[in-house]
Amino acid sequence: MANQSNRNNIVVKNKKASFEFEVLERYTAGIVLAGTEIKAIRTGKASFVDSYCLFVGNELWVKGLHISEYEWGTYNNHEPKQDRKLLLNRKELDKLKRRSQEKGLTIVALRLFVNDRGLAKLDIALARGKQLHDKRETLKRKDAKREMDRLMKR
């Protein structure tokens, strides 16, 4: 039982995504991993720096997702920055492919987590890039919320 509650705490977030992009639609995708990759994720050794999703043929892949080598892995250890295939239903893949080809839309990875069954999942989103003035507005809203929270705690 303690092991299951521990699994739910494993979350790696892409903090830049909410700042750089306006999220339109969210999806939860499975991810194809090797044995040492899932062990490294369970220790929290993953990073979204410079990662993005793209279609190769009719398959969706995540590129640039950095999963550090497993500390106790031997010569069977994985490549940290290799491309990884994402698993979605055919309907979802077709819809994402069609929508991502529209001007200004892209697919970004939002967070990597381990679900209650112990499987690694990747939350992805169809997103539109923000302009500079939109980013400034986001910062203003965030600062105002922080200020209100600080005043409420007094």
Image: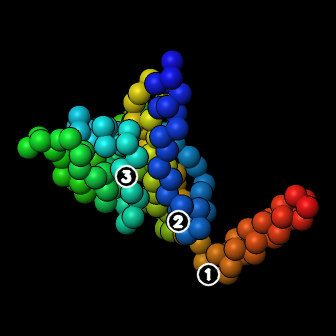
Q: Nearer the viewer, mark 1 or mark 3?
A: 3
Secondary element at image label 2? helix
Q: Nearer the viewer, mark 1 or mark 2?
A: 2
Foreground residue among 74 and 11: 74
Could you tell me if the residues under marks 1 and 2 are in contact, i.e. CB atoms within 8 Å? Answer: no
Extreme residue in the left direction: 75
Asked if 98 appears above or below 102 in the picture, the reply is above
Query: Which residue lies at the image location 73% right of the left edge and 68% below the top edge?
Result: 142
Secondary element at image label 1? helix
Q: Nearer the viewer, mark 3 or mark 2?
A: 3
Foreground residue among 55 and 145: 145
Alpha carbon separation for disc pair 1 and 2:
14 Å
Q: Residue 89: name its quadrant.
A: top left
Residue type for callout 1: Leu
| Disc marking residue 46 | 3
Q: Earlier in the sequence, mark 3 or mark 2?
A: 2
Asked if 88 appears above or below 71 in the picture, the reply is above
- In the picture of the structure, the residue carrying the numbered disc 1 is 132
Q: Quadrant of the C terminus?
A: bottom right
Q: Taking 41 as reference, is 15 left or right?
A: right
Q: Residue 22: name its quadrant.
A: bottom right
Q: Taking 132 as reference, is 4 left or right?
A: left
Residue type for callout 2: Lys
Query: Which residue lies at the image location 40% right of the left edge and 46% below the top edge?
Result: 44
Query: Which residue lies at the image location 37% right of the left edge and 66% below the top edge?
Result: 50
Secondary element at image label 3? strand
What is the x, y in percent for residue 56?
Answer: 27, 52
The answer, for residue 49, to whether it is visible in the render is yes
- In the picture of the structure, the residue carrying the numbered disc 2 is 16
